[in-house]
Image (cartoon, rainbow, N blue to C red):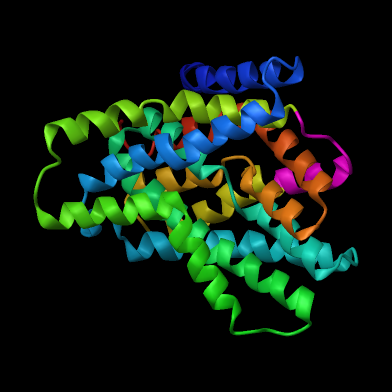
Amino acid sequence: MLDIFLQTLPFFAVIALGYGAGRTGFFTPEATAYLTKFVFYFALSAMLFRFSANLSLADIWDGRLVAAYLWGTAFVYGIATIVALLRNQGIKTTAIEAQCAAIGNTGFLGVPMLVLLLGEQAIGPVMLVLAIDLVVFSSLIVILMSIAKDGRFEPAVFKTIGIGLVKNPMIASIVLGLSWSATGVALPTPVNGFVTLLGAAATPGALFAIGASLAGKSTERIEVAVWLSFCKLVLHPALVAVAAIWLFPLDPYSAGVIIAAAALPVAGNVYMLAQHYGAAPQRVSAAILVSTAISIVTVSLVIGWVSGFQPL
């Protein structure tokens, strides 16, 4: 376990470095926003394209994995929803809290960290988890926010969802990569070298951006932040484990990867959604800060556990 902690520590050290740069003002909020854009639209997209261009859809798709991750994520989403409703929160705040409880930082933290720690064969399950989060749960929150705004469900919301998915560079890069893979033609050497070089910036850039963005987060409603962090860091991986091991039994390695992915802290894009919809952004801010800090220990514990599922 100590060895796993020491392996994960450099990732969190880069996050801490970004946090320090943000807190001291060396890295301004504007600089953080531009770094995030670079990682999101270029570096991470290049990494995902390279990975998916060397895989087929059959290598990635696993119906039982989808069922297991969906079951565990929907379960914790439901728990957070019920608790929020019992506290008399409105639809918008309830939807945002449920998103905090169920959606982890798979893109910026999970892809680079889990692939390096668990091996490149983890990229298939991780990309599938990322796709589920983006397609299913990001769409769900748009639907719920539409209902909260208009008081009813409007079919036109699907157009908004579709446009959002098409414009998402992570989804676009995966689709383009799989499309290239389907041709059976290897990436030309200059292209492969280009996406490899650009993709190599994703890991340090994403981790630094996470830390720098945390520098502007507050800890308002700390008790809610602790509850949502518990949901994300403990309940979510526990429920995904139940599904992946017993309800929809997966091979040990795949089960371990999605359990580790479920253990990631609250995703930063939930804060952007909260700001966009005006739904408790400070509460989300606190949940991201608290869950990321605690995950230094919990993620190491979970990865240490799942790494025993199958020799790495």
Residue 266 falls in which quadrant of the image? top right
19 in relation to 109, above or below: above
| Residue 250 image position (x, y, % from top left) | 35, 56
Q: Residue 25, image x and y in percent?
A: 74, 17
Can residue 69 be seen from the camera position used here? no
**Residue closer to the observer: 119 or 176:** 176
Is 75 magenta? The answer is: no
Vertical comparison of 120 with 85: above or below: above
Q: Identify which residue, 250 or 217, lies in the foreground.
A: 217
Magenta region: 216-230
Count of picture labels = 0
Split into 4 quadrants, where in the image is the C terminus? top left
User: What residue is drawn where x is 44% and y is 38%?
Assistant: 306
- Determine the main secondary structure of the stretch shown in magenta: helix
Note whether 89 is above or below 261 in the view shown: below
Q: x and y percent of residue 223 in the render?
A: 87, 43
In the displayed structure image, the side of residue 153 where residue 170 appears, left or right: left
**Left or right of 162: which side holds 267?**
right
Task: Tell me what residue is drawn at x 40 percent, y 46 percent.
Answer: 126
Residue farthest toward the left in the current orientation of the protein: 185
The image position of residue 256, as x and y in percent, is 42, 43
Q: Is residue 226 magenta?
A: yes
Residue drawn at point x = 79 percent, y = 49 percent: 281
Q: Residue at x 9, y 48 (%)?
A: 185
Task: Determine if residue 96 is in view.
Answer: yes
